[in-house]
Amino acid sequence: MNKTMIEKKLVNELKQGSESAFNTLFKTYERGLYSFVFSLVKLNGEAEDIVQQTFLKVWLNRTSINSEMNFSTFLFTVAKNTALNNLRRIAVERSYLRDEMWRSVELSRCFTDEKIEYDELLSHIQDALNNVSELKKKIFEMSRRDGMSYSEIGEKMGISKYTVKNHIAETIQLIRKEIENNKHIRNSFSILLLFLFQKNN
């Protein structure tokens, strides 16, 4: 039985829900698919996520796979579309964050009282950041100041994106407590900033 026939047999077994066939196809294409996705996104962590998302989509939609179609063509098409969608999402999120922060700064410049209150809010946020570890502070600033994604930060810091997410969540909790302990600054600016700080990457 040649390679094409073996693959077609595996795809038919996959369509029937065979985990063994799925695992065989995964091991066959994982490395090549990763290289392809990495060439698109240029980020190790993001490429790994997209490969996992691709195979998850294959499994969830296994019954609709055309077994007469070249499986590798189908697989790489799914990966390409997933990568492009992820890149669009990241671009939109970063653009939104920058735009909202800019609007908040512009609003604060319009009214003297609000400007003073806004500066006080930033001061309290900085006080909270001064009370966290250097690692947490650096990760938070890379995310919120530099607009880096969890995957990008994790790759640069040598940790997983889930560890990055946990560090940011803990830092946000401290910032929230700092602001909640100063009720006179809990106006629209603080609500806006807290909303921005709670955005996920």
Image: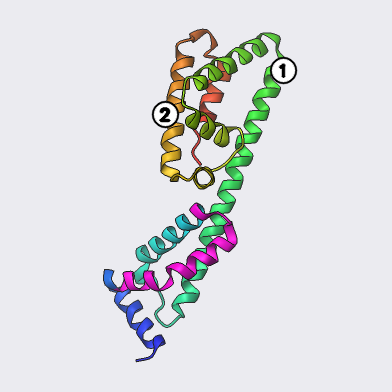
How crowded pointer 2 is (Cα within 10 Å; few <14, some 14-19, many 20+) is rated as some
Vertical comparison of 181 with 133: above or below:
above
Q: Which residue was labeled with disc 2?
A: 170
Give the distance between the C-alpha atoms of the residues marked 1 and 2, in whole angstroms.
31 Å
Q: How is the image coloured?
A: rainbow
Which residue lies at the image location 45% right of the left edge and 11% below the top edge? 181
- Check if mark 1's residue and mark 2's residue have beta carbons within 8 Å: no
Percent of width and height locating residue 35: 52, 66
Q: Main secondary structure of the magenta part?
A: helix
Which residue lies at the image location 41% right of the left edge and 40% below the top edge? 163
Percent of width and height locating residue 102: 68, 29
The quadrant where residue 117 appears: top right
Q: Identify the magenta region.
A: 21-45
Percent of width and height locating residue 193: 55, 24
Marking on residue 109: 1
Residue positioned most to the right: 110
Residue 2 in the magenta stretch? The answer is no
The quadrant where residue 109 appears: top right
Q: Is residue 103 left or right of residue 165?
A: right
Q: Hey, what amino acid is under mark 1?
A: Arg
Residue 24 in the magenta stretch? The answer is yes
Viewer-closest of 50 and 43: 43
Viewer-closest of 90 and 145: 145
**Residue 17 shows in the view:** no
Marking on residue 8: none
